[in-house]
Every structure is written in structure tokens, then in C-alpha cells.
């Protein structure tokens, strides 16, 4: 039965993983995300957790944790990790491998100050890293919740997206969302009609439902069937540039086929508004309040909020922008969200754009009101 | 015996994938000897369907399709955590990490030491040839004092990592041994004992194998020199046996 609870964001994430049927958390403690580990380790060693076969392992570092996560996924277990900041940087090595081999790793990433160790709580400066970290072309799915309830909702959804589409899938929160406490409706996905997708092993799976051919890029896979048994061999070190090209084009083709059904966005406010504010995550929540405050001053403003940062909701963004006379991008980073917006609009929609960039610091509704009022 | 083996009448383990032969290792390389010993042990124990083999980056990666075994090539130094994750998620899997001395003792040393400390139920095989081989002969943590290598042109320093001794120090109950490719029957017995320990779920299994690198030892033209260096130099610095 669904019930409302007073929870911290990180606990909402832990409960979301549990509700999604996740089995294994491989992690390494880091502020502002450690409470996900605290929650899961407690669940795993309790009687219910033991019955469900929950796995918790605190690794030697984030590199270890993220490669253990790959091991868990290869074994066909819904596995995840939770980190942020410098830990998120270290995990890019494994995320690259997951991107190359179409391994559905799931990570809860709570952004903290940057660059470097910086402040331990808040920023929006891990957008580039989450979307495009690693030495590939950024084929990972990134959801950005903007309130506690969405931490739970999208905390469940990331598992389904990952195992359905087989791309690395991340929830990109921040330390404010992770550490704040509030009311969250906890539910079993079944109650809401959400069917959870079953995972399947990449290795030692002898009764496969979804074939590996057509999923793992062909130069990376060799399958041998002998006496009715399948032996799958995977590689990511390739011999020829042409093979690497093929891997990348096959990944792109798979991505392009599903990106349109993955994208999510939200638009709030008067469609006739001259000012379009673009913001994501907790800054989008702040912008919603700002829109109400501006309305009281007789200024019409509208919010475009990408929920998926990757794939970016390009079409919807262009439609919203085409109706505006001014665009304001507000983010707790410099030119990370704004770059996505500019990429999306360049050569298609010509509307002046103002950037309100406050790296690693929160943005209040009244600040947004001031920026819009001064346009 | 499977058809390919019967047709060629080969003295290879049955779990070897004949289609991927000839192998890609250099002539005189020790890797195929170590892999053969492992393959025979797998055959004898009848565990081909249950083994998940993880291979590291470096010359180890050339083993990615050496066997008819489910095999994953990982990143440099990261094979141990991948196999740890897999074993935790699938306790029925027999998980073997096949790593070079650079992967195990340099870039992946943190993973090795902590997996040993946690007594993870995985089997780790480290090929020690005293050099970074695939990247072109640079200094490894196992390079012996005074050896001339590409990143130590004036001679390597006096220290070197003794893996099995180190693992034994951390984990008193693990299976810990060092073998050598020049003693194939001993090596097969060692691999079999190690695998049995792993199958029984008795904790961390660590096998180092002394192995020649004819290319970087510059002995490709002279098998006697290769054998001499392996048995008379390497095996003296790194004693073979159970720890």
C-alpha cells in the first residue's frame, strides 16, 4: 500500500531502488550521497533483505565500486551505485565501458561543489560529466529530478529505462535534494500499473530471452554454440579503427532509434509569455516559484524544464523557445545546461539568450525574479 | 572430445576454442602455457559451463576468445572488481580474473589488496614476466633491480613486489601459490588445486605464474636464454611454491 513518509532525499532513493527490485549496491561513501549506502546496508543485513538476497558491498574506492557494478550487471542482477563529485569523476572509467558494451548500469549521482573536492553539498556542475564523461560520445540516459517525490519516482524509473534500452542510466540529483527532508509517497510500482522489466545476464546465461547479437556492438562479441551451450566472449579492446567506427555507429543507431521515446520535459506557465526560463533540477523548482512571483508583478514568464538532460528534449525545447522573445538559462554551473540549449537552438530558433550562471551555489526564486525583471 | 579437437588431433584442452588459433601471443610467450594449464584443469574438473573468465588489458587481453568459456575483457587493472561484483551477484559462477603484473600490482593494486583483505570468493591469476609487455617493455613493479627497460634505461630500482608473499600477509586463510610456465605438469596441478579451493568456496585464491616475455627480454632468437632468465633469474628472485 502506498504511504506517505517523512524522508531524506537519499532515503527516498534507497527506497526507490528497493521498490524497483534492485538487488545489489556497490558503493563507496561520499558526501552528499552516503545515506543511500547507510539505508541499503541496513536493509541488506536485515531479515527481509536476506530473504530477498540483497547485496551490499563497500568497495575500496569508486573505481572498484563501479567495476563491481559492471560485474553485477554482467551476472544479470539489477545493480546500482550511488556517488557524486570526485567519486562521480572516478566512475567514468567504468561508465565508459558500460557505454561501449551496452551494459545497463544504474547510478544515483548527487552533484556537489566543483571543480576538485570543493564543497560537499551542492552544484549543478556535473552535467557535462554525467552526460558526456568518459572517452565516448555520451550515450547515457540522464534524468534530473527536481523534488523529493521525483527522487523516488525517477529512482524507480531509472532501472526500467536501463534494462529496457540497455544504456547506462543515471539519476542526476544534487546535495540539496539528497539531504533535504520532506513528505514522499512511497508505493509499489505495481500499484501504479508500472511493470518492472526483468534483467538478464550477459554471462553464464544459458536460456537467453534477448539475444546478445544486435545488442552488444558486433565487433565486441563472439558467440560460440557447442552441444547446445552458448559461450559468449566480450571485448572492448579492438584491433582496427574500422572496428571502433562500427562499434560507435551501432551504438548511435540504437540510441537514435529510441531517443524520441525516452525524452521527457515539463513546461510551466503562460504559453504567451515573452520570457522563457530554462532550468533543471532544484533550480527548476525555484523557477516555478519565481514565475508566480513575477505574475504578481504583472510579468508573464514560462519555464522549460528538461527532465532528461540526455537525450535532451530538443524538439520540445525548440517549440517552447520559438514562442519566446527572451530566454533565460539559470543554472548552478557555468555554461553546462546553457550549452545544451544553445546546441539545440543554433541555426533553428533565433532568440536572445541570457545566462544566469551561479556555479556551485543555490539559486533562489527572488534572484530569478530580479534577472527577469531587469531584461 | 569435440569435433574440432578430434579433427586436428590436438593436445589442447577441450575448452580451448580452436577457431581462434593460432593464438595472437608472440612466439615463445608464456601466456599460452599458463592458459593451457588452466584449460586442462577446467577440463579435468568438468566446469566449463560454470566459469566466467575476466581478462585484463595488456597481453592478458589476447585471451578474450582463447577459450569456449564465457569471457569478459575489462579495463586495465579492473578485472578483479568486475569478478568480485559478478561473484557477489551470482555465487554459482566460478570467477577467474586473469591479469598481468602491471594490472595486479600497479594500477589495480588497491583492488587486489582489498579483495584479499575481504577474502572475496574469486580466483586471481597473475602473469609475472617482470615487465610491461604489450605497451612496449616499460618498468613494472616486478622488474628486477638493474634490468634495463624502456622507462628505466639506466636500470630498474632495487625494489620489487612479491605478490604471493604480500597476499599471504594480508589473508592467512587464502589459497596462495606461485607457479612457473616451464614446469607445465606442476602448473596444471597447481591450477587444479586452486580451482578446487575456489569451487569449494573457501575464499580468496591467488596464483602468480612466472612467465617468459621473449619480445621484451629480447630473447626471441634464443630459447636457451629465455629459459635461463626464467628459471635462473626470475625464479630465484620469486621462489616458486605454495605460500
Image (tube, rainbow, N blue to C red):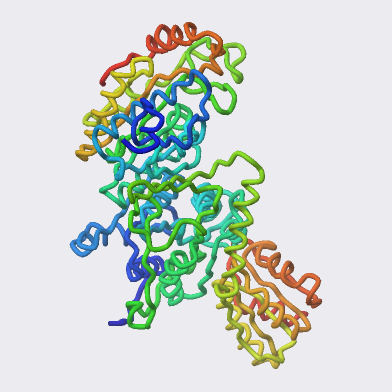
Identify the residue at horizontal 36%, vertical 67% (top origin). A198
Taking A85 as reference, is B128 left or right?
Answer: left
Taking A317 as reference, is A215 left or right?
Answer: left
Measured along the vertical axis of the image, is residue A17 above or below residue B61?
below
Front one among B219 and A356 = B219
Give the quadrant of residue A181: bottom left
Identify the residue at horizontal 42%, vertical 66% (top origin). A159
Measured along the vertical axis of the image, is residue B231 above or below residue B190?
above
Measured along the vertical axis of the image, is residue B55 above or below residue A98?
above
* Residue A13, horizontal then vertical, whole percent: 40, 67
Would residue B173 be seen by someone viewing this image from the given angle?
A: yes
Identify the residue at horizontal 63%, vertical 70% (top origin). A312
Measured along the vertical axis of the image, is residue A106 above or below residue A346?
above
Front one among A183 and A344 = A344
Would residue A32 be seen by someone viewing this image from the given angle?
A: no
* Residue A74, horizontal then vertical, whole percent: 40, 52
Q: How many numbered circles does the render carry? A: 0
Give the quadrant of residue A253: bottom right
Taking A101 as reference, is B231 left or right?
Answer: left
Front one among A111 and A80 = A80
Front one among B229 and A333 = B229
Q: Which residue is situated farthest in the front direction here?
A: B7
- State the quadrant of the C terminus of chain A: bottom right
* Residue B171, horizontal then vertical, whole percent: 26, 31
Identify the residue at horizontal 71%, vertical 77% (top origin). A371
* Residue B98, horizontal then vertical, whole percent: 40, 34
- State the quadrant of the N terminus of chain A: bottom left
Give the quadrant of residue B232: top left
Amino acid at each position: 500500500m502506498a504511504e506517505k513518509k517523512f524522508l531524506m532525499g537519499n532515503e527516498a532513493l534507497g527506497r526507490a531502488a528497493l521498490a524497483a527490485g534492485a538487488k545489489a549496491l556497490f558503493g563507496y561513501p561520499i558526501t552528499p550521497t552516503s545515506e543511500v549506502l547507510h539505508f541499503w546496508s541496513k536493509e541488506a543485513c536485515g531479515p527481509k533483505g536476506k530473504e530477498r538476497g540483497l547485496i551490499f558491498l563497500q568497495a575500496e574506492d569508486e573505481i572498484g565500486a563501479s567495476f563491481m557494478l559492471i560485474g553485477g550487471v554482467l551476472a544479470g542482477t539489477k545493480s546500482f551505485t550511488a556517488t557524486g563529485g570526485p567519486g562521480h569523476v572516478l566512475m567514468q572509467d567504468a561508465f565508459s565501458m558500460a557505454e561501449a558494451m551496452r551494459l545497463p548500469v544504474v547510478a544515483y549521482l548527487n552533484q556537489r561543489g566543483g571543480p576538485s573536492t570543493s564543497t560537499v553539498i551542492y552544484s549543478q556542475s556535473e552535467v557535462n560529466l554525467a552526460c558526456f564523461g568518459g572517452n565516448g560520445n555520451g550515450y547515457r540516459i540522464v534524468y534530473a529530478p527536481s523534488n523529493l517525490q521525483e527522487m523516488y519516482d525517477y529512482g524507480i524509473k531509472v532501472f526500467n529505462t536501463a534494462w529496457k534500452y540497455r544504456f547506462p542510466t543515471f539519476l542526476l540529483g544534487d546535495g540539496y535534494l539528497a539531504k533535504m527532508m520532506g513528505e514522499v509517497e512511497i508505493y509499489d510500482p505495481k500499484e501504479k500499473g508500472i511493470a518492472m522489466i526483468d534483467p538478464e545476464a550477459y554471462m553464464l546465461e544459458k536460456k537467453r530471452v534477448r539475444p546478445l547479437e544486435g545488442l552488444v556492438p558486433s565487433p565486441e562479441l563472439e558467440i560460440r554454440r557447442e552441444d547446445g551451450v552458448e559461450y559468449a566472449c566480450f571485448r572492448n579492446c579492438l584491433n582496427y579503427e574500422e572496428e571502433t567506427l562500427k562499434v560507435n555507429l551501432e551504438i548511435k543507431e540504437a540510441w537514435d532509434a529510441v531517443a524520441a521515446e525516452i525524452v521527457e520535459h515539463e513546461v510551466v506557465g503562460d504559453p504567451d509569455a515573452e520570457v522563457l526560463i530554462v532550468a533543471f533540477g532544484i533550480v527548476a523548482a525555484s523557477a516555478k516559484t519565481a514565475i508566480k512571483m513575477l505574475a504578481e508583478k504583472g510579468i508573464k514568464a514560462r519555464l522549460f524544464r528538461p527532465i532528461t538532460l540526455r537525450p535532451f528534449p530538443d524538439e520540445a525545447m525548440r517549440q517552447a523557445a520559438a514562442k519566446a522573445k527572451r530566454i533565460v538559462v539559470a543554472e548552478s554551473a557555468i555554461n553546462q545546461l546553457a550549452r545544451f540549449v544553445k546546441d539545440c537552438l543554433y541555426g533553428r530558433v533565433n532568440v536572445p539568450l541570457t545566462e544566469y550562471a551561479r556555479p556551485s551555489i543555490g539559486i533562489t526564486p527572488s534572484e530569478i525574479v530580479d534577472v527577469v525583471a531587469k531584461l | 572430445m569435440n569435433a574440432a579437437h578430434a579433427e586436428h588431433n590436438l593436445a589442447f584442452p577441450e575448452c580451448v576454442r580452436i577457431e581462434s588459433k593460432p593464438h595472437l601471443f608472440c612466439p615463445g610467450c608464456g601466456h599460452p602455457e599458463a592458459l593451457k594449464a588452466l584449460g586442462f584443469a577446467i577440463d579435468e574438473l568438468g566446469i566449463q559451463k560454470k566459469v566466467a573468465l575476466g581478462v585484463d588489458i595488456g597481453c592478458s587481453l589476447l585471451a578474450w576468445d582463447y577459450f569456449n568459456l564465457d569471457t569478459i575483457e575489462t579495463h586495465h587493472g579492473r578485472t578483479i572488481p568486475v569478478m568480485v561484483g559478478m561473484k557477489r551477484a551470482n555465487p554459482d559462477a566460478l570467477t577467474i580474473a586473469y591479469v598481468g603484473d602491471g594490472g595486479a600490482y600497479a594500477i589495480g593494486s588497491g583492488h587486489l589488496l582489498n579483495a584479499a583483505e575481504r577474502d572475496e570468493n574469486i580466483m586471481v591469476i597473475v602473469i609475472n614476466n617482470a615487465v610491461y609487455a604489450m605497451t612496449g617493455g616499460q618498468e613494472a613493479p616486478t622488474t628486477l633491480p638493474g634490468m634495463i627497460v624502456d622507462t628505466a634505461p639506466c636500470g630498474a630500482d632495487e625494489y620489487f613486489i612479491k605478490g604471493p608473499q604480500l597476499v599471504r600477509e594480508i589473508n592467512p586463510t587464502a589459497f596462495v601459490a606461485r607457479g612457473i610456465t616451464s614446469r607445465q605438469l606442476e602448473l596444471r596441478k597447481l591450477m587444479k588445486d586452486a580451482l578446487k579451493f575456489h569451487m569449494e568456496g573457501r575464499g580468496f585464491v591467488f596464483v602468480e605464474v612466472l612467465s617468459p616475455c621473449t619480445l621484451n627480454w629480447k630473447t626471441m632468437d634464443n630459447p636457451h636464454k629465455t629459459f635461463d632468465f626464467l628459471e635462473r633469474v626470475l625464479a630465484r628472485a620469486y621462489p616458486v611454491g605454495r605460500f
